[in-house]
Amino acid sequence: MKIQIILEALNIKNYHNDIISFINDCEKMVSDPNIDKYEAPYKFWEEFSKRCYNRFHVKLANTTDHRVMGSVSHENDKKLYLSIDIVNKVFDDIKLYRTISPSAKQILIEVLVHELTHHVQKTKRDYKKAAKNKKGYFGDPSEISAFVNQNIKNIERDLPSNYTSKQLYDVISNTFRFFSHYSQEIKNQYIKQ
């Protein structure tokens, strides 16, 4: 399990960088003033989806379920679903500004990395069962791994180059601050990972 986590973390760093590169390249492509502003979001999404498929072997799709930011299908179709809210924000930004706002870009990257982690794990999950589990949805080891992976760039960004153990603890605690109502056992799993 530990070797899988290490290999997964190495892959995830590349995922972050690849997704950022894809977004930047696609933004550059649609910045051409000759591309109609209503066509630009579709061109952006088509190229971005193609690059994600070629790199990660998943098809991007959207879901109208507003309760989830993303999900992944391990069936034959290998689809990675993004919330329609995220997709609409990307479309609106591209149509109006030919670029994606920093906040929308961060959400897109984090959700993609989170769901790509689940794709790599190749485990089918029963979310209702996980939620009823004594440790709950966020106590599930595959969720811990996915959440840490989606936030690893934020942790790296917030850490000074020469950090103390206290600074490391503070940055990690701040990243996982919304887990305050969970047991110390679950919080320790996140911090350990």
Image (cartoon, rainbow, N blue to C red):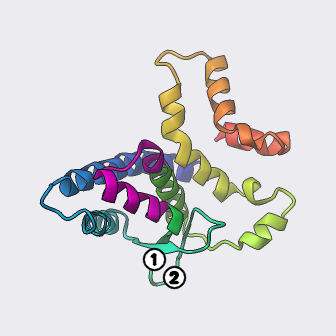
On the image, which quarter does residue 66 sit in? bottom right
Q: Residue furthest left?
A: 34
| The disc label shown at residue 43, or none | none
Q: Could you say where residue 37 lies in the image, as x and y percent from the top left? A: 25, 62
Q: Could you say where residue 42 lies in the image, as x and y percent from the top left? A: 29, 69
Q: Which range is magenta? A: 86-106
Would you say residue 87 sits in the magenta stretch? yes
- Between 29 and 98, the one lying in front of the other is 98
In the figure, is residue 145 to the left or right of 80? right
Q: Residue furthest bottom?
A: 76
- Above-or-below relation of 179 to 161: below
In the figure, is residue 24 to the left or right of 6? left
Q: Are marks 2 and 1 in contact (CB under 8 Å)?
A: yes
- Amino acid type of the residue that numbered disc 2 sits on in the rendered structure: Glu
Q: Could you say where residue 190 lies in the image, as x and y percent from the top left? A: 69, 42
On the image, which quarter does residue 65 sit in? bottom right
- Amino acid type of the residue that numbered disc 1 sits on in the rendered structure: Lys
- Identify the secondary structure beneath mark 1: loop
- Identify the secondary structure beneath mark 2: loop
Q: Could you say where residue 111 lies in the image, as x and y percent from the top left? A: 52, 56
Q: Is residue 166 visible from the viewing direction of this image?
A: yes
The residue tagged 1 is 78
Rounded to the nearest whole Å, what is the CA distance between mark 2 and mark 1? 6 Å
Q: Main secondary structure of the magenta part?
A: helix
The residue tagged 2 is 75
- Between 98 and 155, the one lying in front of the other is 98
In the figure, is residue 109 to the left or right of 135? left
Identified at 58% across, 62% down, the residue is 69
